[in-house]
Image (spheres, rainbow, N blue to C red):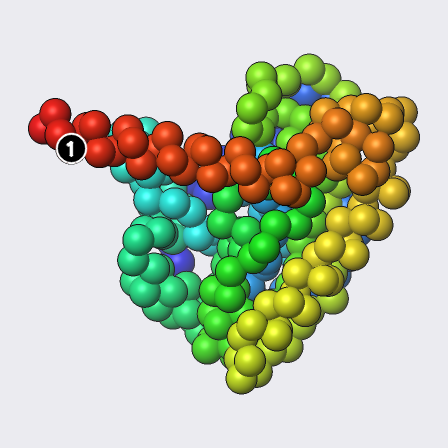
Amino acid sequence: MLDLTYPPIILAAKTGFRLLGQRFDLTGTEHVPRKGGVLLAVNHVGYLDFIYGGLAANPSGRKVRFMAKREIFQNAVGGPVMRSMHHIEVDRGEGLASFRTAVDYLKRGEAVGIFPEATISRSFEIKDIKTGAVRIAAEADVPLVPVILWGTQRIFTKDHDRDFSRGKTIAIRVGEPLRLSGADPVAETAELRARMSTMLEETIAAYPAAEQPPGSWWLPARFGGSAPTPEEAARLDAEEQRRRAEARRAKAADS
């Protein structure tokens, strides 16, 4: 693919990381192959995860084409930028087109990124995940590489103010590739979720203790933080979905 905007955007992002004094703890990046199709399954804790998630493949010289919700592509500024980087538009109401595009990209040897939780986890733990990642990887016959991000939620996430203060650590852990048959997407998705959950626990344990003291809002409740429990997070998600549905109905009634 012709990439005119992706390289300068990567350079600008890295410059921003340096200006913010961010420290990166990258492990396992050797698990991303240097060539050939590969699907990266990334956990979702903040709005900037698609920026930081791409760093998992950067040491391998790969540019990741992320699957992202169509609302971003409808933005007057974000849309042209996303399309110029060959990211993949996802319509949550009709996912077949994005599924086919992702499979096509992978068969052409691209690195594709997907957030299998679909939405940001308010508990910062791994939510129930969709079978799409497993089905895409199996259809394209490519390895599925789990990736865990930690620390990005401290910058910009749901229900909290943005915080671009200096000196934060961003942890990126890349796991061993999974080779999936697709014969039982539900079981293989459960395997992916279990792998990502274990990686997340390891990442949290290795994160600088001075940066996540007990009671931290960005730390899961079972690790001593004050983040919502998965059950509380699910309730908040349901309330958010209800409000959005009501807003859509009101907008439709006014039009």
Residue plotted at (86% across, 25% down): 213
The residue nearer to you, when weighing 185 against 30, is 185
Q: Which quadrant: the N terminus?
A: bottom left
Q: Is residue 13 left or right of residue 251?
A: right
Check disc 1 and give the amino acid type.
Ala
Q: Which quadrant: the C terminus?
A: top left
Which quadrant of the figure has residue 46? top right
Where residue 154 sits: x, y (%)?
68, 26
Where residue 176 sits: x, y (%)?
74, 66
Residue for badge 1: 252
Q: Is residue 86 left or right of residue 156?
A: left
**Up/down of 43 relative to 224, above or below:** below
Count of number-bearing discs: 1
Where residue 105 sits: x, y (%)?
42, 65
Residue found farthest to the left: 255
Helix, strand or loop at mark 1: helix
The residue nearer to you, when weighing 37 against 197, is 197
Q: Is residue 237 left or right of residue 190?
A: left
Residue plotted at (35% across, 51% down): 92
Residue 87: tell me if it is visible.
yes
The crowd level at tag 1 (other Cα within 10 Å; few <14, some 14-19, many 20+) is: few
